[in-house]
Image: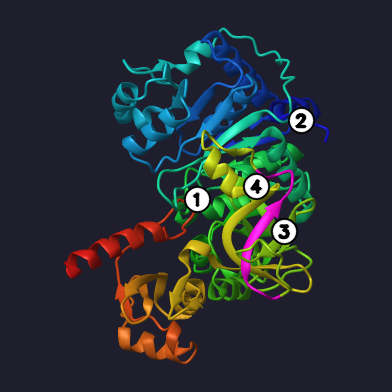
Amino acid sequence: MEFKNLADMLTKNAKRYKNKKYIFFEDQKYTFNQVNKITNKLANALLRLGLKKGDRVAILLDNSPEFIFSFFGITKCGAVAVPINNFLKEEEITYILNDCEVKFLISSENYKDFFPYLKSNTNSLEEILTYDFSSSYSVNLNELMANESDENLPCDYDMEELAVLIYTSGTTGNPKGAMLTHKNLLSNCHSTTQAFKVKKRDRFLLFLPMFHSYAFTTCVLLPTFLGCSIIILRSVLELRSKKFKNILLFKRPTFFLGVPQVYSALAKAKLPNWFIKFLYPVRIHASGGAPLPEEILNVFKERFKKPIIEGYGLSEASPVVSVNRLEWQKPYSVGLPLPGVEVKVVNDDEEELPVGEIGELIVKGPNIMKGYWNLPEATTQAIRNGWLFTGDMARLDEDGFIYIVDRKKDLIIVKGINVYPREIEELLYQYPGVEAAAVIGIPDEASGEVPVAYVMPADGAELKEKDIKNYLKEHLANYKLPRKIIFTKELPMTATGKVLKRKLKELVLKDYQNKKS
């Protein structure tokens, strides 16, 4: 690989693509060279404050160029970046800061109400650093950077050094910090370049939260690796604004990374057919973060005459494991493994299963994390003989395409028979008027467990339990049918639109226990 580490990647590409536009954000534009100089100043300011190689620095920022400046400024010091989910509350953020003993937090005025709590409750936190803003709890980073040198730093540390701690969304208990090295992330960029067939002239549209490994690797690190441009939107909400048409028309993004709900909204967007036919610039639509229901795929393809390339990954794999290819896709599949990545499907005895049989998906490759921060037992459980045990149930076909069936932990066992919630959810998503759906298992004396479906109706939709049950009966064996269909105004979700079934199950079981007692 031509880059020594992530910092070296930006330094070399700034020399190579000096005046090429690297970041577009609202009315701001930055070239590769400008960003490189800003990050050099930031790194020098952090070093002057006492940052040392291996120290952890958290980033609590909205989508913005400053997020990218912060990340590369941290890596140029040989320190470890810790992106923070900005949907979290103070207590949840404090848990992460304490868990990895963060030295500095880079944030903004938007989070100033959190600062007193974070300062009081995080023992290791020395300073909160903010761009364009000072307070009694924070230091103005721009002032610190003003007199620093913008010359390149040596950045000669090893590929195996820790670069990022990504805290998983906590499907079980407290979030765990996945330790990703420079090699993990650079290898993932190298492999996704080959799989997506991305070109240097591509422009990446970034609107998913930048703290998420899926958005950050694919829409920040990958374009930086290739020397492409990044168009940053503040949030997914901008896709619904009048600005979106102007962004398509004037900034011409060609790579669009979304989640299923975004593609559902895009399929219904008020874009004239002539605009889609003659002026729509996007050539690659990628989807991940949550399973893509067939209904959304079909509606989108019908309107845009382009496929959605579904992929699969997890934070522990930096994060991309597999993607469909532009030239070869299979419906319902998350595609072929990336070049250099191996996958197997195994049973509970860790024996490889034949083609078509369902078992746990395990992954091996240069993108697999070092382990979980300060959790040796959890690491040993997750990584065995170099293989990452994903916890996802899957099958492989004769061509090696991967089909995710469900989460191992979400499996429902009815009278000893496996029921996969995703199969029921796929059918629910196809029912007119269903915006989102989740199926969980609840205890039952006669069957052990029974499926219960939670359905969030679309705006204005009037749904009836009896009608949905009759519809499901036409497609499912009786033992798979949900005992109840419960309508709800909202479901607990992650930043990428994946239903947090653990939280839903906790709420439901609490209610179930209360009724029982």
**Above or below: residue 428 compared with residue 209:** below
* Residue type at the position of mark 3: Val
Query: Where in the figure is residue 362, as x and y percent of width and height?
Result: 66, 57
* Residue type at the position of mark 4: Phe
Query: Where in the figure is residue 272, as x and y percent of width and height?
Result: 56, 68
Q: Mark 1 or 2, which is nearer the eye? A: 2
Q: Which residue is mark 1?
A: 243
| Distance in Å between CA atoms under marks 3 and 4 | 28 Å
N-term mark: 1 or 3: 1
Q: Secondary structure at mark 3?
A: strand
Name the residue: 78% across, 48% down: 199
Mark number, residue 204: 4
- In the rendered image, residue 364 lying in the magenta stretch gets the answer yes
| Distance in Å between CA atoms under marks 1 and 3 | 42 Å
* Residue type at the position of mark 1: Lys
Q: Which residue is mark 3?
A: 343
| Distance in Å between CA atoms under marks 2 and 3 | 32 Å
Figure quadrant of the N terminus: top right
Q: Which residue is mark 2?
A: 13
Using the image as rendered, state which of residue 161 and residue 290 is in the foreground.
Answer: 161
Q: Secondary structure at mark 1?
A: helix
Q: Residues within 10 Å of mark 1 (few under 14, many from 20)?
A: few
